[in-house]
Amino acid sequence: MTRLPMIATLVTVLVLSALAPEADAGARRSRPVRTGQTTCWDTAGTVIACAGTGVDGDLRRGEPRSYQDNGDGTIRDKRTALTWEKLSDDGSIHDWDNVYLWDEAFEKIADLNTPPCFAGFCDWRVPNRFELETIVDLGTANPAVSAPFNTGCTPGCTVLTCSCTFSGVHWTSTSAAGAGNIGWGVNFFVGSANRNYLKATESYFVRAVRGGS
Ligand SMILES: [Ca+2]
């Protein structure tokens, strides 16, 4: 190889490596998920036509919801790659009205991860606050989730036949910075997240999650 083509090759390599980080960053780009809101209201709370208002129900920005029921008691969120435990009303560990102190939430997880493990996976965990908020659907309330998390919830139904979400506070694995005896929770009545919940004395619902990375 003559000197000039060698330099040209070197320049090409340098240019490509300079471009690579940008291409990588683009590949890892992630958008917030859609809130689910498609209705628009004015200041007085009257429903109005959305077009041109610029409010959430008009713009509907973010990743559209995309869920898959795996048929094994779990739901995969194709946007986040998180897999969620379905909740039931059959008195099992998955029952939607089971409540747990903070420590007990992690005991539930330990039970799910005891072989053969729930749905064949032994890496269930309590979701962090931002993970749990990704299944909030602000297009509805009581409970603020979309249909895959609120379908056919009748007494006796199992994770294979229904999907339940209690309209109340669910623990996250996230603690309140500066007040570690308090945990963050997401209230699925309207989808609010708060850090008001006392780990030692207050009992809330738990939905397990796995995957996502
Ligand atoms: Ca029950």
Image (cartoon, rainbow, N blue to C red):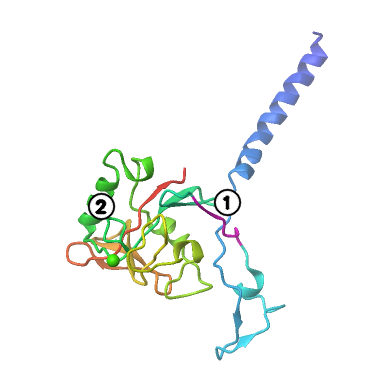
Magenta stretch holds residue 26: no
Would you say 83 lies left or right of 124 here? right
Q: Quadrant of residue 20?
A: top right
Taking the image as shown, residue 88 lies to the left or right of residue 66, namely: left
Foreground residue among 196 and 74: 74
Q: Position of residue 60 (x, y in %)?
A: 63, 68
Q: Are marks 2 and 1 in contact (CB under 8 Å)?
A: no
Kindly state the secondary structure of the residue where label 2 is placed. Answer: helix
Q: Bounds of the magenta span?
A: 62-69
Residue 30 numbered mark, or none: 1
For the image, the number of numbered tags is: 2
* Amino acid residing under circle 1: Ser
Q: Quadrant of the N terminus?
A: top right
Q: Quadrant of ligand 1?
A: bottom left
Residue 58 in percent (x, y) is at 66, 74
Disc 2: which residue: 108
User: Looking at the image, is 60 positioned above or below residue 17?
Assistant: below
Label 1 environment density (alpha carbons within 10 Å; few <14, some 14–19, many ≥20): few
Q: Which one is in front, 84 or 3?
A: 84
| Secondary structure that dominates the magenta span | loop
* Residue 80 relative to residue 173: left or right: right
Q: Residue at x 43, y 70 (%)?
A: 191
Say above or below: 150 vs 41.
above
Residue 79 drawn at (x, y percent): 55, 52
Q: Residue at x 29, y 43 (%)?
A: 113
Mark 2 burial class by Cα count in 10 Å: few <14, some 14-19, many 20+: some
Q: Is residue 125 above or below residue 202?
A: above
